[in-house]
Image (cartoon, rainbow, N blue to C red):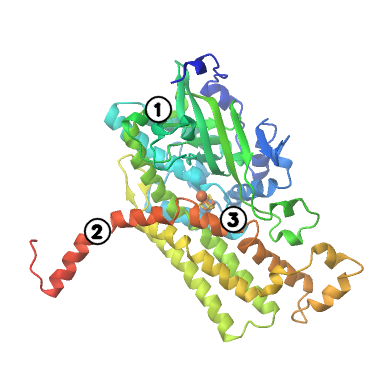
Amino acid sequence: MNDMVQQNLRSQYSADEVWSQFKPIVTGDDYVESLRGRNLKVYLFGEEIAEPVDHPMIWPSINALKASYDLATAEPELATAKSHLSGEQINRFLHIPHSSQDLVLKNRMQRKMGQITGTCFQRCAGLDSISVMHSITFDIDEAHGTQYHQRFLKFLDRLQKHNQIIAAGMTDPKGDRSKAPHEQADQDLFMRVTARNENGVFVSGAKAHMTGGLNSHWIMVLPTMRLGEEDKDFAIIGAIPLQAEGITYIYGRQSCDTRAMELGDVDKGNAQYAGQEVLAVFDNVFIPWDHIFMDGEYEFAAPMVERFTSYHRASYVCKTGLGDVMVGAAATIAEYNGLEKVSHIRDKLVEMTHLNETIYSSSIASAHESKPLPSGAWINDSMLANVCKHNVTRFPYEIARLAQDLAGGLMVTLPSQQDFESKDTGALLEKYFKGREDIPTADRVKILRLIENMTLGRNAVGYLTESLHGAGSPQAQRIQILRGMNVEQKKWHAKKLAGIKQVD
Ligand code: SF4
Ligand code: FE
């Protein structure tokens, strides 16, 4: 630990103090209001932003999270659940799964949220982090006689009662991939404890591409990978309010994101919703003991990460909701072009649906095949969750390719909304971009812009590249599949049928 840090301790709030600042959230509008006035240090385009909530590039990502509150009101049977702590009805994004049905409903809700927003709605990593903390804190206490589980339950109860959003701060920058955290030339490349005192701990480091980071109320910081004994100071898990002193947020770019700053909604493709990723940099940020759920128990980092991936790789069922929008958009443009009855067009829609439902089936199967852990929380089947995420690294690309096939090249050569509205060129564009006679040209343009948005533009970040790299890149799933595939047993079956003598 660094002695210099001791002279530079940041404001040490207590857990009660920070909770007393929060008002419980009821509606989606309450949620948006709850994000205002937090005085966060946020940088975008090299400048500090006064109020992220009002920024044109940021608010569509807030709107995607707002939809999770609105869905809880509109469809409580799907998007709320009974808390196992208070017995009260809570948002399902804050519910610890206590049965396979809970995980099935979670998946259905995620698909629905994908259909509503057409983007990454940013809440699942946080949900998956609290789900994993339920069992990991229980297991650490069993092994070490610590008190993390009760502490975590108290935190969770408050989180549920305040109906807040928690983001997962999981991905450390990692530096030289061949080196362990303690071996890095720059020790800040993995989050670590810089100081401890009677009130809590101080952490430094950074969490990269944090989904919905700015739109949340809390960040659960968690180790990103297996740790050894010499990495003890990196084995830290805690919950940090976004406005804690010492955090700097730097906003991530998305392709075509500056279209959000243009006038008019058409060229945006999906003007209402977008995803968000930020880099959060922590400079000796304080966490009170009440919000610390692991401190030094390095041997639990690996099972924590493994359980997190079982939950989170099944959460990528979210992309089937976006896939539904893709199929719908492709079918709509085919109809607008007067081609909906052509057999190869129908067959392409069948292919897109088959791929999308294959993703869904692996995720929903992993929920049905879930098992309870000693804490009472249920966890997705790891093999099927990994298969789901691995499908997600491939199939949305093929679905997107087919949607672009049906859209035609016009999708990427269309003039701007301003040209369609111009007195000089509007009539010409109206005439020459007409499809079927009974379909307004403007509608044809809008659906093409949506396909552009999801396959090339802002929400292609969520539909494609996040599908590839989120919750671990493809190789990470192949490693898990290799570990779980039990090839010896499969060889035994084959040899038995072939009549080959074997030991048992
Ligand atoms: Fe949820 Fe999917 Fe976004 Fe991850 S990528 S936070 S699982 S919507
Ligand atoms: Fe993700």
Measuring 43% from the left and 53% from the top, which residue is drawn there? Answer: 313
* Disc 3 target residue: 461
Q: As drawn, is 272 to the left or to the right of 200? A: right
Q: As drawn, is 199 to the left or to the right of 492? A: right
Q: Quadrant of the N terminus?
A: top left
Measuring 38% from the left and 36% from the top, which residue is drawn there? Answer: 180
Q: Say whether disc 3 or disc 2 marks the residue closer to the N-terminus.
A: 3
* Disc 2 target residue: 486
- Which residue is the extreme one toward the right? 423
Q: Considering only vertical position in the picture, is 352 above or below 184?
A: below
CB atoms at circles 3 and 2 under 8 Å apart?
no
Q: Amino acid at mark 3?
A: Val
- Which residue is the extreme one toward the front? 185
* Residue 92 in view in this figure: no
Which mark, by number, is residue 233? 1
Q: As drawn, is 87 to the left or to the right of 249? A: left
Q: Amino acid at mark 1?
A: Asp
Badge 1, how many Cα within 10 Å: few under 14, some, many 20+?
A: many
- CA gap between label 3 and label 1 equals 34 Å
Badge 2, how many Cα within 10 Å: few under 14, some, many 20+?
A: few
